[in-house]
Amino acid sequence: MDVEELRQRLEHEKDALPLPESLLKRELVPDFSLVDSALDWLQRSLHHHIVTLDDPHYPNLLKQISDPPPILFIKGEPDTLLLPSIAVVGSRAATSSGLQSAYQLAGELGSLGFSVSSGLAAGVDGAAHQACIDNNAKTVAVLGTGVEVIYPRRHKKLYDEIQCHGAVISEFWPDVRPYAGNFPKRNRIISGLSLGTLVVEACRKSGSLITARLALEQGREVFAVPGSILGGQSQGCHDLLRDGAKLVENAADIIEEVSALCDFHLEELKSRHHIGGENASDLPFTSLLASVGYEATPIDVVVEHSGKAIELVLEQMLELELQGWVAVVPGGYVRLRRS
């Protein structure tokens, strides 16, 4: 084998060789046109945000997965990514029963201060997002396209409303079009953002099962809603339940499983953002607790009396609930015990 033949073979097989770091640095040339396009997009609106791994708005849970996205493009409210989140995923061709279950459970989770993460797809995803919007709760749509590309197109109104009730995010450049291989990639972000993943109505070949598997690999909880044994629409959910996923009938079934991880998330959040400026001795948020009566107190009244931002109120009310100080009731919160 002469030198030229060897050079040609090495050129062809270079991706399989353990190249020295110095050579890698010479070969990897940044595409500054892409950098410029990202910065141009960022400057178009105050509601456009770019978050990198070292940014305080980068979700801590997402950072813990094996392959966190190095960059997130965000349209909407980046603070939404700081809230404890539950993923709700399921069939694109859901039955009316499946849509109703997704809507009800997502609405309950949203009213308890969780954000709900999903993928803006037809069916269960759309129902989960819509429930949060209707209940004035927070939701995050993780796209398999760029954030400027709406897919499916019929979710244009939902896409716009989510930006006012949370955030639309993607790891892909803003103008990236739909590509089948990108949707499984976005699933790891949906599960990675979340304390747990709830699967509603999934057949055995559903993409939602990919999200559930990723959640398990990431050390997160997996939940499933049982369905009819007829038709096969819920076979995937039944398989998850058979393999150890928790059966869910209401939001309380989820909360009791994620409370420990949620406590860790809130403590990490406070340490990263110095929330409230309160010492540990001040817990459980005495100023906020004083705003809740022994009869139902609406959340807007709690916010007004506490003088705190609604995002902070929701985070701290969730912790108070988990500690047994307050409970969620129709019309708001009620205090359970004296300090």
Image (tube, rainbow, N blue to C red):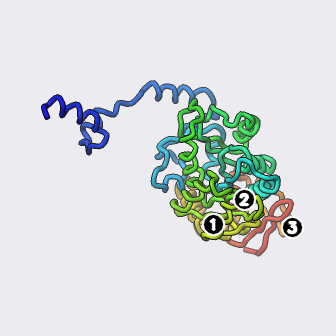
Location of residue 64 in the rendering, given as x and y in whole percent from the top left corner: 49, 56
Residue 244, image x and y in percent? 61, 71
For disc 2, the marked residue is 232
Q: Which residue occupies 75% across, 55% down?
A: 102
Any part of residue 322 in sight = no
1 or 3: mark nearer the eye: 1
* Disc 1: CA contacts within 10 A as few (<14), some (14-19) or many (>=20): some
Relative placement, left or right, of 205 versus 185 is right
| Quadrant containing the N terminus in the rendered view | top left
Q: Earlier in the sequence, mark 2 or mark 3?
A: 2
Marks 2 and 1 in Cβ contact (< 8 Å):
no
Q: Quadrant of residue 203?
A: bottom right
Residue 332 horizontal side relative to residue 199, left or right? right
Amino acid type of the residue that numbered disc 1 sits on in the rendered structure: Val
- The numbered disc on residue 295 is 3
Q: Residue at x 54, y 37 (%)?
A: 172
Q: Where is mark 1, residue-wise? A: 258
Pair 2/3: label in front:
2
Could you tell me residue 308's position as x and y percent?
70, 53
Look at the numbered disc 3 and give the secondary structure of its residue: loop
Q: Nearer the viewer, mark 2 or mark 1?
A: 2
Q: CA distance from mark 1 to mark 3?
A: 27 Å
Q: Nearer the viewer, residue 78 or 225?
A: 225
Mark 2–mark 3 Cα distance, whole angstroms, equals: 45 Å
Q: Amino acid at mark 2?
A: Gly
